[in-house]
Image: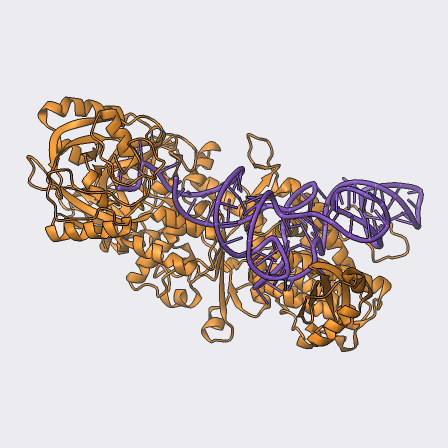
Chain colours: A orange, B purple
RNA sequence: GCCGAAGUGGUGGAACUGGCAGACACGCAGGUCUUAGGAACCUGUGCCUUCGGGCGUGGGGGUUCAAGUCCCCCCUUCGGCACCA
């Protein structure tokens, strides 16, 4: 584009501007001006109101790509709009530079993670600056900087003190490729969220955050977030937390003092219970099994342990299990039932034991059928139902078997009432109670990988787990230069003998550091707090500043983090609030999830060879055109198929807008008052609507309105009021300001050509003259039997009677009525008349 | 199976509380100016039409003077959850 020559005859202003030159010209000017530096004092003094605009910080695993370009382009529209509206906007950026994505990329490139990571950060920083996002670079940090992770470790210790961080032995998700454990949230359809390898289970002692302590609040607050958060994400979190209401029911098992408690959501089906099933991998099963059945049980357990998660999750394979040889007593009916072990019951949900009701539950039905256990119907099937295994909804027909006397009568009651009565009965008997269960599990945070914050705990043979004292933080990651950092299943930190072997802070005896590192998501669970006081060396964050800037007024990112980062950050916020470190309940007041950039209907990927390089697009069309393309393509939430959009069209439009600035023939500062009224009205209407559209995140329509203004201004110059009319200057200046949200280089260039100083980004939103929003005439539609037959130009304050009369007098309307009798006339002044014959 | 979102021209997408469906673009067609056009500008572009008009927002019903928008049923696509008892 830069070599395009101007050969246009007759109009010297119809040149095209040099994209590269304009970018090179303004970048250093902005660098010097720092127009987007957020000042704490301005907010503290009340001089301006604050806005906190946050967009997800990148992993430094390469240069920026199309996805980054999209999210920052969208985000920047809002941030720059808020500046123009007179807010003090904090719009920080940094790097999420610990963790698997960066580490794996480094290993692939045969580099030490630290070198590789920091090299990429430099590359991305330069790209961001060229891309001209309104970030406040004075606040940047990297989560892998010791000054940052010192405080990540500090926060871990506060969690530990509160019992919110703990260690336990449990079967955990294991990624055989990345050679590390994974949180539940990082397992998608039985595979590793990062690399796609099939996840297996391992029994390991690992660190957890007690997210379940906040399950109910995390769920409840979603109601408040619903109006301003992406519905997709709210829905995903609700499903993930997975609240269910039911009951705990105690079954006495022979040969055991403590009863075995089961969890059920349908206590009303207790009369249909014909067996009990226990999760085969739960300690309870091992405890209950009789000596005679032990061999069979252990063989079965071995078989189950060899299954992958994917096999285990499959619901369409036949049920398996083994009889544990003991019997349990139904606390309501007193009936004796067998106890089995199976893999379809989960050890870590509910109590790991279930009452088997084959007449009411599909899975129990399948199990009973395979094992030859009795089936008792519990609900009334529809009249046309044939068979024995109906398990749908319907009035309960639960009642005790013949000869059993029970004081609980729920036969024929609706399910909800039957449940309530059964729970009340169990409660009174002392054999059960109503309870609530969540699908959400605690967050497994240890990782057996190098690139992360070391867990600041020392294991002492005498004192057990001993926290590293605060004044010894950070526990710095050993450099391990020259060591093999490839994943091997145990943390590479274990190989750093000098680092590992320390004396116990309590007793001074020989002890070892915990060698695992923290999940990257720990780093990102509080980074938005650190931005408020990024260079404070005395504390993780300044609570006063956090309470002043927070919570974030907008957060934009991808919904792949719906149940990961977004849930963890919410958990951290609530936990820190309860520690008195901050005063709000939720970190992100509004969340906008942006779609993906795809190509030809498919995700961009190396293997498909359909990747579109951001650098290539920027070189061909320039920053502004790429940004405009991304913003204009669709609503922010929708995916953008690069094959469907036109960056060349965007560039064409920008050139068109730019050309207007060369046509303006009035002097800077000319009052628009005497300008062409029609153009002035359009200008003011456009500003008014554009503001509203940005507020509701309809950025694509905002661009469309700007295009209309450009088109109308072009017409006004060429065949209307002419280039010297003050309204033309007003319109073009408005275009420059509107474009400053999307295409900062062109906007700045236009602003200069209009005779102004930089920077257009901070000149302020144009003031709308309300008088100019009033229209002199509107088009009223006249319908006959719902079909449009005429359009009338009428005054906006025409009376209903006058409008009706005008409509009935219209020639086309008379023809359409064709002499038929008028039954009814609906008049909605000044917009519409509908005549019914 | 459970929960949620969405279906509008050849394409991306507009349409505020029910009130002119298809804004703004892309693409395509024609034109003006040009040595030239992958430049600029102008015109046209939902479908059908006997040029009166008729039909059109996934399908079928309904409410209403009036439905892309509200209600019921169905179909399709996408997303979340899922042997969670």
Q: Position of residue A725 (x, y in %)?
A: 82, 71
- Locate residue A475 relative to residue A223 in the image: left or right: left
- Vertical position of residue A321 compared to residue A28: above or below: above
- Vertical position of residue A636 compared to residue A106: above or below: below
Taking the spot 53% from the left edge, 47% from the top edge, the residue there is: A122
Picture quadrant where residue A782 is located: bottom right
Residue closer to the observer: A171 or A403:
A403
Q: Position of residue A676 (x, y in %)?
A: 80, 72
Taking the spot 26% from the left edge, 27% from the top edge, the residue there is: A369
Can residue A804 be seen here? yes
Can residue A56 be seen here? no
Picture quadrant where residue A726 is located: bottom right
Residue closer to the observer: A176 or A337:
A337
Taking the spot 62% from the left edge, 52% from the top edge, the residue there is: A631
Q: Position of residue A589 (x, y in %)?
A: 44, 61
Q: Quadrant of the C terminus of chain A?
A: bottom right
Number of numbered discs overlaid on the protein picture? 0
- Locate residue A662 relative to residue A342 in the image: left or right: right
Q: Position of residue A121 (x, y in %)?
A: 50, 46
Picture quadrant where residue A79 is located: bottom right
Residue closer to the observer: A198 or A233:
A233
Residue closer to the observer: A251 or A565:
A251
- Locate residue A169 relative to residue A21 in the image: left or right: left
């Amino acid at each position: 584009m830069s070599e395009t020559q101007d050969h246009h005859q007759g109009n010297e202003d119809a040149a095209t501007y040099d994209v590269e030159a304009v970018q090179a010209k303004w970048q250093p000017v902005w660098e010097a001006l720092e127009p987007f530096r957020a000042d704490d004092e301005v907010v503290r003094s009340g001089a301006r109101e604050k806005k906190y605009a946050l967009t997800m910080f990148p992993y430094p695993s390469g240069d920026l790509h199309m996805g980054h370009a999209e999210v920052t382009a969208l985000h920047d529209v809002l941030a720059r709009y808020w500046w123009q509206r007179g807010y003090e906007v904090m719009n920080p950026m940094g790097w999420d530079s610990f963790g698997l994505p960066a580490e794996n990329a480094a290993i692939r490139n045969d580099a030490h993670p630290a070198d590789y990571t920091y090299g990429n950060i430099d590359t991305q920083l330069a790209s961001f600056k060229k891309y001209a996002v309104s970030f406040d670079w004075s606040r940047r940090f990297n989560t892998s900087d010791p000054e940052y992770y010192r405080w990540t470790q500090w926060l871990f210790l506060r969690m530990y003190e509160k019992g919110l961080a703990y260690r336990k032995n449990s079967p955990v998700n294991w990624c055989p490729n990345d050679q590390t454990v994974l949180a539940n949230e990082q397992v998608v359809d039985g595979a590793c969220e990062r690399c796609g390898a099939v996840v297996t289970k391992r029994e390991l002692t690992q660190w957890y955050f007690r997210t379940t302590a906040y399950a109910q609040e995390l769920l409840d607050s979603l109601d408040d977030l619903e109006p301003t958060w992406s519905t997709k994400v709210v829905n995903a979190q609700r499903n993930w937390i997975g609240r269910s209401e039911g009951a705990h029911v105690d079954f006495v098992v022979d040969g055991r003092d403590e009863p075995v408690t089961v969890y059920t959501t349908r206590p009303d089906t207790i009369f249909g219970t014909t067996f009990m099933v226990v999760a085969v991998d739960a300690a309870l099963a091992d405890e209950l099994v009789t000596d005679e059945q032990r061999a069979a049980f252990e063989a079965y357990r071995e078989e189950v342990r060899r299954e992958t998660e994917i096999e285990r999750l499959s619901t369409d394979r036949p049920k398996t299990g083994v009889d544990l040889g003991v019997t349990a007593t139904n606390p309501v009916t007193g009936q004796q039932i067998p106890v089995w072990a199976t893999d379809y019951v989960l050890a870590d949900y509910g109590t790991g034991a279930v009452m088997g009701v084959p007449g009411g539950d599909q899975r129990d039905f399948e199990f009973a059928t395979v094992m030859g256990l009795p089936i008792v119907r519990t609900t009334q099937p529809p009249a046309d139902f044939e068979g024995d295994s109906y398990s749908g909804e319907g009035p309960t027909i639960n009642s005790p078997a013949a000869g059993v006397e029970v004081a609980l009568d729920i036969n024929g009651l609706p399910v909800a009432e039957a449940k309530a009565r059964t729970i009340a009965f169990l409660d009174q008997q002392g054999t059960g109670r109503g309870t609530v269960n969540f699908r959400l599990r605690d967050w497994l945070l240890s990782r057996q990988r190098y690139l992360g914050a070391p867990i600041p705990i020392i294991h002492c043979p005498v004192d057990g787990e001993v926290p590293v004292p605060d004044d010894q933080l950070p526990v710095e990651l050993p450099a391990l230069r020259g060591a093999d950092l490839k994943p091997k299943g145990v943390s590479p930190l274990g190989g750093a003998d000098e680092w590992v072997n320390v004396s116990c802070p309590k007793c001074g005896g020989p002890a070892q550091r915990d060698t695992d590192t923290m999940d990257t998501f720990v780093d990102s669970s509080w980074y938005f707090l650190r931005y408020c006081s990024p260079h404070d060396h005395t504390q993780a964050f300044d609570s006063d500043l956090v309470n002043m800037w927070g919570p974030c007024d907008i957060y934009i990112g991808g919904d792949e983090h719906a149940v990961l980062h977004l849930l963890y950050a919410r958990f951290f916020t609530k936990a820190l609030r309860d520690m008195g470190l901050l005063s709000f309940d939720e970190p992100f007041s509004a969340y906008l999830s942006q779609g993906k950039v795809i190509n030809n209907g498919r995700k961009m990927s190396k293997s498909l060879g359909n990747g579109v390089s951001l650098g290539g697009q920027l070189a061909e069309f320039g920053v502004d055109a790429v940004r405009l393309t991304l913003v204009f393509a669709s609503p922010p939430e929708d995916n953008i198929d690069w094959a469907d959009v036109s960056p060349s069209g965007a560039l064409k439009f920008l050139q068109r807008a730019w050309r207007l600035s060369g046509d303006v023939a009035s002097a800077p500062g000319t009052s628009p008052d005497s300008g062409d009224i029609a153009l002035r009205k359009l200008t003011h209407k456009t500003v008014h609507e554009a503001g509203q559209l940005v507020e509701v995140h309809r950025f694509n329509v905002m661009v469309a309105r700007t295009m209309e203004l450009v088109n109308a201004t072009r017409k006004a110059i060429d065949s209307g009021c002419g280039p010297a009319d003050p309204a033309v200057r007003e319109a073009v200046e408005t275009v420059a300001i509107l474009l400053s949200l999307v295409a900062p280089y062109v906007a700045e260039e236009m602003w200069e050509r209009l005779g102004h100083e930089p920077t257009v980004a901070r000149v302020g939103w144009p003031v709308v003259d309300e008088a100019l929003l009033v229209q002199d005439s509107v088009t009223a539609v006249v319908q006959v039997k719902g079909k449009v037959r005429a359009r009338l130009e009428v005054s906006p304050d025409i009376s209903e009677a006058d409008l009706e009369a005008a409509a009935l007098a219209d020639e086309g309307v008379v023809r359409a009525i064709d002499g038929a009798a008028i039954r009814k006339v609906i008049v909605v002044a000044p917009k519409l008349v509908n005549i019914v014959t």
